[in-house]
Image (cartoon, grey):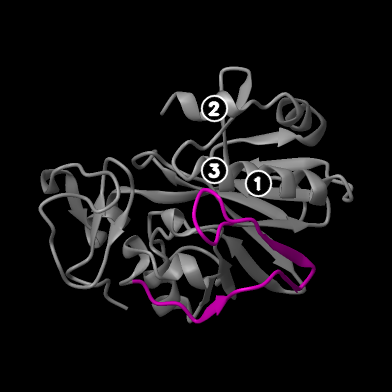
Amino acid sequence: MKLLKEQYVCKRCGYNIIGGYYPESCPFCGVSHENFITAEECSQKYSIVSSKINNKIDRLNSYPKLGFEHSAYCIKIKGKNIWIDCPSTFSKDLEPMDKILFTHPHFLGASNLYRAYYTTFIWIHKKDSELPIASKHPFDKKFEHDFKLEGIEAHIINGHTPGFTFYIFEDVLFICDYFFLREENLILNPYGPAHSTMDGVKRIKEIVKKQNIETVCGYNYVMDYKNWNKKLVSLKNESFATKL
């Protein structure tokens, strides 16, 4: 399969611009179009590296680091590969993935290319699929309620985006960028409505305390749950006072 000619990738943030148009600035981070490369160039210059979280989960990253760079995760279940979020780089050197489940639309990455090449099914919350940043991306299922798929639990919490969803598989929590690590502290992602984001934190606490979580997978970190939970307990509303 030849990659789409008119797909571009922002080198500053990694956002994939699809739909056959070339904007003056990146729809996600706002940087000038001079920072764009084609998806073809991106695949030639960047690869996907995999690091093991446990015997069923791998962490996926672009190499070298692409833009803000976020991690995606591959869960191996019953002979299938199910991803949580998607790298910004497209690679034909990966094992086929059955589905990509999204936490929110900021990490759509090159999912449209993986969908076309591997016949992958793309799932995202309906409200997030309707946001401008996601409007040109293809989706196969737009869910509206919590669900369980192949042992993966999906929990919708709203907040950072209208349909933000976190996932749990066995003893691993996939929380994406609802929280950032800054030095030794855990802070809330400040880019979202403060009230509903804090409500989301309450829901997260209620859900995870009933689970036997051992590991937390964030957008750029993997951490022992006990250490992460200590930071969560001490989280303050002041996270919104300082933008990243």
Residue 67 versus residue 50 in the image, above or below: above
Percent x, y of residue 125: 54, 69
Q: Return the residue nearer the eye: 66 or 241.
A: 241
Where 215 falls versus 174 (above or below)?
A: above
Give the CA distance from mark 1 to mark 3: 16 Å
Quadrant location of the C terminus in the rendered image: top left
Which residue matches tag 2? 239
Residue 190 placement (x, y as % from top left):
48, 36
Residue at image point 13% right, 61% down: 22
- In terms of secondary structure, where does tag 1 sit? helix
Q: Is residue 163 magenta?
A: yes
For this orientation, the residue located farthest to the front is 195
Query: Is the magenta region chiefly helix, strand or loop?
Result: loop
Amino acid type at circle 3 is Asp
Is residue 244 in view? no
**Disc 1: CA contacts within 10 A as few (<14), some (14-19) or many (>=20):** few
Q: Amino acid at mark 2?
A: Ser
Mark 2: give few (<14), some (14-19) or many (20+) Cα within 10 Å: some
Mark in front: 1 vs 2? 1
